Image: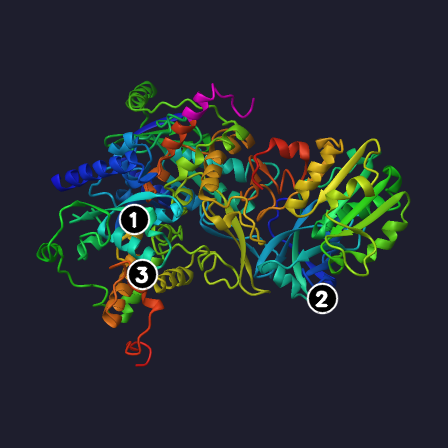
Amino acid sequence: MMIKKIDKNQFKELFDKLKENYNIAAPVLIDKNKKTLVEYHYIDDFDKIDWDEQADSSPKNIIFPQNAPVGNDYKEKQYYDTEQDTLILGVRSCDIEAIKTLDQVFIEDEMYIDKNYKARRDKITLVGLSCPQRNKSCFCDTLGFNPVESNYAPLYIFKDGNEFWIKVKDKKFESVFENLPDGNQDKLEELIEKRINTFTESSFELDIPIPLPEKEMFEADIWEEMSEKCLGCGICTYYCPTCYCFNFIWEGKDGESTKYKNWDSCMFSTYSAHASGHNPRDSKEKRYRNRIMHKFSYHPLNYEGLGCVGCGRCIDRCPVNLDIREALKLTEKYLEEKGGAKSGKD
Amino acid sequence: MEKTDMLPHKAEVLEIKQETETNLNIKTFKVKFIDNDIRKNFNFKPGQFMMVTVYGLGEAPFGFSSSPTEKDYIEFSVKEVGLVTEALHNLKEGDKIGIRGPFGNGFPLDSTEGKNIIFIGGGIGLAPLRSMINYVLDEKNRDKYQRIQLLNAFRSPEDTLFCDDYQWWENSKDTLVKYTIDEPCEGWSKCVGYPHTLIAEELDYNLPDTRVFTCGPPIMIKFITERLQELGIEPSEIITTLEMRMSCGVGKCGRCNIGHYYVCKDGPVFTLEQLREMPDEY
Amino acid sequence: MKKYEKITEEIVEIAEKLLKENTVEKVIGFGIGIFTEEVTPIFISNPENADRLVFNSKAEMSLAKYLLNYKDQKVAIVAKPCDSRAIATYLAEDLIKRENIKVIGINGCPGIENNTACEECDIRNAVISDYTVGKKMTEEEIEAKLKDKEDKIEKMTPAERMEYFQKEFERCTRCYACREACYVCYCEQCFTEGNQPEWVGDSVKLNDNFTYHLMRAMHMAGRCVNCGACEMACPEGIDVRALAAKMCRSAEELFDYRAGIDSDQKTLLSDYDVNDTESGFME
């Protein structure tokens, strides 16, 4: 591993150099008429990067766009985004873990590899950012993730004031950074340690088994209370960095039609409705249960790890401030009252 | 066919058979892949399904209703209920559709060998069973299985499906075929009543080592599985196939899950024993 | 701010009494989350928890829609003046039973932070209530609160307006939060959900986004109470309220009609008068 330490001006120079070979996306502040939001956008200007605020929408939008062509009917070929290499800069641990989850689902399952996703993903390099501070709703540390460091990104930035420490974890990138001044590893570890402590002070405690016991929690009588205020919109799923449900659709006339992979949301009633009208999840309560259970029971049963990374966006963006942490606390209480729960794997 | 391919292969509609029209509009489509290699390499098991594309319009899952022993074509039956099914019903012979698959686990053929088999199909639920019926009755396979019994249930005489098969089913070796409709009807001399009420009197349900395959409307499945258990059939020997809204067919798009199982990937065929362990959401 | 605290106190008192006396099974109101300071809808059925109810400048949600979930239960609801208009419209549309609901109406609503609808609001007292909290505002007081600002969209040329809405709607992800937050949008099946015919394509494209927002706006005529819940709910900061607000203005200008003024009024589209203007159709 290579450790570099540079100041803002040096980073700016580095940025301009990287720009020659990469498209660079990073969190930037965007004026959206009625709101001002931080989002991942492709940028040319280093100074536009917002290092301090967690982005209001996740880098999922770049890796797994809302509408992506799969292929068409007139030439039996698949669309691959074979654009230039892309760097996503300033991705925090929560979002890196989320991308790991998406990779698990779309690339690492031998049953099915999503070629389009893979083609796009292969061109993307994640440049992680050690999380500067907790935002008002995030809880990645409660779920066992490390906000200050994630091993899944090949490049990792630790920003300390105007100084940037860069950990080059993948040998492939060493040549890009080799001429920059070295950083002292012990000093960096010290800084990292110090920052972790600022997080642990304000963690919220949660003691639930993962995976949640599937049938027991499915049948629990808590879901109505949990979902009572839910409006049934798709915000929590659209802004969630791990939610990956989609819908295949065909657009265009026969002979010139294209198949798209579009985001879908388990919070919409149409999502699971049969053509006959029958709907296995015909109420808000059932849909909400499915969303929570998918993240904390079904996904962990099918793959390694959680389906939630604790980024807190579903809480921040929810129009009625429905709080997933309250749902988890209610789950904890329910299982506690039932006399200690076994995880779904036992 | 490559499993990861999300684009369908083109197939030509060879024949469209209007099965029923009066109450329900059901047609059976006989199709073949245009590409010879694909046709040759396309293998499926009874109980599996495919995603059928009407180009420019949409895609929907349909179970195979023909047997994999038929190498020249595949068949599937479609009840007109929504957008894609309506578009399929409007197709003409010679039109092109897209097919990808096969998906799902299919019926357990190997572990059923040596057993007595009962098939109970209700309405269009007979379609996936027909794939298996034609497979086990095929002369290459017939000797692998013991006595085979069919109870085919329809709403009325106008709703009977796959009538062209009845004769050879009835004439097959050691095979019993029964038909029932919901209400008595002039000119109908076969059984009358819901199928669960007929199992005990019309079928030899108590042969040793019997396995039951049933498919039909959810309410019928409910009554049949209850009745079969009363008659002493083990839940592990009661096999059914589920229907869900699906889009990908490979357990990714999310909508067909029952707990952590995906009907498209882990199903659509489940034993009653498995279903009992799963959350009740289908 | 004193005003909000006073209103909160009064709400808690009434809610506690209603629950204690079993007048209602549930009180729908605003509360504070367990983990955050954010305002969130809460549903209180135990009188001991009545003190969880609050009202402050962030009580931005329209609660009226929740009434549709409790049609056959006796419930009380905290209603800002705009929410009370929504309730009056539900009563006019015969969706809820008057005898089942107790309205705790807020008089002299001080308004909601960042909600631009409040700046245009001239109905600041509950139009329907069984219990009132706050202090009734006089016409003069309301007048003084109105921000006299020119409507920048009306002033635009058609081309500018097109550009404005294009810029807005191209950001729409069709999460449907505006629809779900809106009290008017209670259809069992939204026109966006059917596919026979498919009015709105599944992919998020500008023309389909336009179709969605324009068609939704048409359904707002004579029903929108200009509460701003749609705009507050939008995660992309889109000016979703503009079209609905225009429908409100048109209904008023053409038919002298405002939604939810009282629960006995006929709804705009179910009423007809031979003298009704045909402006817009016949010119």
Residue C235 shows in the view: no
Distance from Cα at disc 1 to Cα at disc 2: 56 Å
Q: Magenta stretch: residue A215 in it?
A: no
**Element under disc 2:** loop
The quarter of the displayed image where residue C264 is located: bottom left
Label disc, if present, on residue B147 of the rendered structure: none
Please name the residue that numbered disc 3 is placed on: C223
Label 3 or label 2, whichever lies nearer to me, is 3
Q: Which chain is mark 1 on?
A: C
Instruction: Answer with mark 3 or mark 1, whichever residue precedes in sequence.
Output: 1
C50 vs C234, nearest the viewer: C50
The amino acid pointed to by label 1 is: Ser
Span of residues in magenta: A332-346
In the rendered image, residue B146, in percent from the top left (x then y), is placed at 87, 37
Please name the residue that numbered disc 2 is placed on: B94
The quarter of the displayed image where residue C119 is located: bottom left
What's the residue at 74%, 61% (across, down)?
A: B158
Residue A338 vertical placement versus A86 (above, below): above
| Total labels drawn | 3
The amino acid pointed to by label 3 is: Arg
**Element under disc 3:** loop
Q: Magenta stretch: residue A342 in it?
A: yes
Distance from Cα at disc 3 to Cα at disc 2: 52 Å
Residues at marks 1 and 2, common chain? no
Q: Which chain is mark 3 on?
A: C
